[in-house]
Amino acid sequence: MKKLPFTISKAQFITLQKTYKTDVEMAKFLNVTRQYVFAFRKRFDLPIFKVSDTKINRNKLIYTDYSMRMMPKVDIAKKYNLTRMTVHRIIKKMEAK
């Protein structure tokens, strides 16, 4: 793990975690990569963010569009601004439940 141009304690990191809800947001704030934030979290044995409620709701909507409305995956991807492969993965995951 590369050294940051500043030091950050575990307590400061936890405080940031409450403000910035995702690894991506924290990475932008700290001007590091998302992978660095993940590694930092793993190094200090901090809990990894769960999938947010908005993503869970989005996934349900995607599955509804696919199963009930018979929308093609390409159209669903455009509607939710995702890749076709991401839509495919979400649908497979929802079908497995």
Image: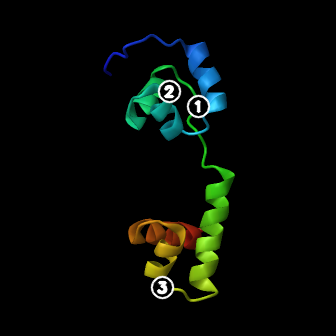
Task: Name the residue: 51% across, 77% down.
Answer: 76
The CA span between labels 1 and 3 is 37 Å
Regarding mark 2 in the picture, which secondary structure is present there? helix
User: Residue at image x 64%, y 72%?
Assistant: 61
Using a 10 Å C-alpha cutoff, classify the residue at mark 3 as few (fewer than 14 neighbours), some (14 to 19) or many (20 or more): few
SS type, badge 3: loop
- Residue 41 rendering spot, x and y as whole percentages: 50, 27
- Identity of the residue drawn at 56% across and 26% down: 46
Q: Are marks 2 and 1 in contact (CB under 8 Å)?
A: yes
Foreground mark, 2 or 3, reads 3
Residue 17 image offset from top left, x and y in percent: 61, 29
Q: Residue at x 60, y 80 (%)?
A: 65
Disc 2 target residue = 41
The residues bearing labels 2 and 3 have C-alpha atoms spaced at a distance of 38 Å
Name the one closer to the observer, 54 or 79. Answer: 79
For discs 1 and 3, the disc positioned in front in the rendered view: 3
